[in-house]
Amino acid sequence: DLGSLTIQPHLGRRSALRRHGLLYIQLYNTSKGIFAAGNTYPFANHALDTLALDPGLVRAWQHIGQALSHSPQAILRAYLHAKVRCHTALTSCRNHSYGTREEYRVSGPLLHSIHQVMSRRAHPRAIMPQHATVPFFIHPTALFLDWIRWNMNRLCLGFELVYTLQSHTVVHWEHTRVMMMFLRALTYTYGGQGHHLRHSNGLWLDCRVDPGAGNGERVVEGMGVGETLDRYG
């Protein structure tokens, strides 16, 4: 969460931070550069869900809408290309260092005041003592990238395993739901800056209650990833 976070003081006049010139604070993870290419990320194609649908259903939609839908062959090639792209990126980035960057957007008068204070301060001559513990995690880049590769392979394997179970002429609805779950997990995990699993209710929530249109409330069950992370980390 801290790797993609924006903190903004209250817009009203009661906010002392805003009155003194602090506009907002932004934190973002520099590891987004591993997969970013012209602000395009792997598995960000919203048509990937087409791979999980029954071909007859896709043809019916094309007939009703009188328009050509996404080509399953083209979407499959895009999926395979995304995997090759991720493999290349993870292989070539092992000698880089990544972390969470903080940016503070302030007003001109506050920036001038900060500059004056910092200019009056002399450089410290004594070396600051190093504490045994630090308030953040430090992991080797190789370990971090290996975990990303393992997690991505896990999600891809889940999708591809179910994809090979059906004959590509009739896709069972149960298989479609499982394949869409893995594809959306890939999209909301590696599909770009700002994506998060909580943006998908089916993945993040355990269950939710939707108000019915006249037949009463309807309970919709999800994967409960948010509750699992909160409980087990």
Image (cartoon, rainbow, N blue to C red):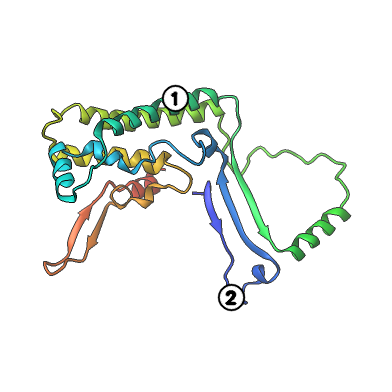
Q: Quadrant of the C terminus?
A: top left
Q: Residue at x 34, y 27 (%)?
A: 80
Q: Is residue 108 left or right of residue 147?
A: right
The amino acid type found where label 2 is placed reads Gly
| Picture layout, residue 157 above or below residue 3 | above
Give whichever of 1, 62 is nearer the camera: 62
Res. 171 image quadrant: top left
Q: Residue furthest front?
A: 66
| Picture layout, residue 202 above or below residue 112 | above
The amino acid type found where label 1 is placed reads His
Residue that numbered label 1 is attached to:
87
Q: Residue at x 22, y 62 (%)?
A: 210
Give whichever of 42, 225 is nearer the camera: 42
| Picture layout, residue 220 above or below residue 34 | below
Q: Are marks 2 and 1 in contact (CB under 8 Å)?
A: no
Q: Earlier in the sequence, mark 2 or mark 1?
A: 2
Residue that numbered label 2 is attached to:
12
Res. 20 image quadrant: bottom right
Determine the secondary structure under disc 2: loop
Determine the secondary structure under disc 1: helix
Give the image location of residue 54, x and y in percent.
16, 38
Q: CA distance from mark 2 to mark 1?
A: 48 Å
Res. 180 image quadrant: top left
Q: Label 1 crowding class (10 Å Cα cut-off): few <14, some 14-19, many 20+?
A: few
| Picture layout, residue 212 above or below residue 67 | below
Q: Residue at x 27, y 41 (%)?
A: 49
Give the image location of residue 114, x and y in percent.
78, 59
